Image: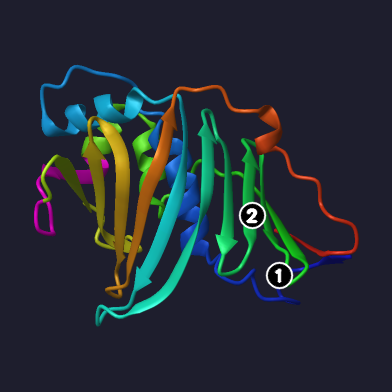
Amino acid sequence: MFLTTSCLKLPRLIPCLLSRILLGLCLLIQVPIVSAATVTSELSQLLGANHTFSAYFEQAVYNHQGRNIQESHGRIWVERPGRFRWQATEPYPQIVVSDGDKLWFYDPDLEQVTIRKFDHQLASMPGLLLSGEVEQLESSFLVEKGSVAPEIEGITRYVLTPRNPDNLFSVLELAFKDRQLVAMQIRDSLGQLTEFRFSDIAVNQPIDAGQFQFVVPEGVDVIQQ
């Protein structure tokens, strides 16, 4: 059954911002390796070393008052260019898949799949801006080394502030340990904070191509965008 976006709401827990976050995670690893002459190029070098990335994730969302309003966990698989699978298992099962051409958002509880074109030009997603040359990163963000939160031993943090004041988010923070991405925080323009923590991380290991394919289950509603 095919529906338009005016007929049904988007899948639960997959708002536009989350879809952009997932695209960003996919494209974060596509920054080319450059000499670490500045903080910006140092960050680019760390990101560019990853061709594939898989991990267990824990996600938490906090409102502007710091209250935890949502939690989820599952696994993520990423491979450049443009392929990823995000599979949340708790509290609500959900799957987001990209083959580099299309995006599928599947909510089993709602029996609903949303399909949209994979778009590298979603300018409001912070991670997409990291997919180009280091000059693009530097022109789009003020990149600082440090943290907006208390330092944790062994963690190196990079804080990215958009140069465009109209962006949907105000701060993007990436945390590395032993040169691996272990956490990401995004604070939006309304003060809401989305935090991702990664564990059981595998980098530059082969990933089954089937992880980046999705077959629409029989009988579910399909929204084409």
Q: Quadrant of the N terminus?
A: bottom right
Query: Which colouring convention does the figure follow?
Result: rainbow
Give the residue displayed 17% in from the left and 44% down from the top: 157
Q: Quadrant of residue 105?
A: bottom right
Q: What residue type is disc 1 on? A: Thr
Q: Is residue 225 left or right of residue 141?
A: right
Identify the residue under disc 2: 95
Give the residue displayed 39% in from the left and 37% down from the top: 28
In the rendered image, the vertical position of residue 21 relative to residue 168, given as above or below? above
- Magenta stretch in the rendered image: 139-151
Q: Secondary structure at mark 2?
A: strand
2 vs 1, front mark: 2
Q: Secondary structure at mark 1?
A: loop
Q: What residue type is disc 2 on? A: Ile
Q: Quadrant of the C terminus?
A: bottom right
Q: Is residue 149 highlighted in magenta?
A: yes
Of residues 80 and 209, the one drawn nearer to the viewer in this rendering: 209
Q: Is residue 137 highlighted in magenta?
A: no
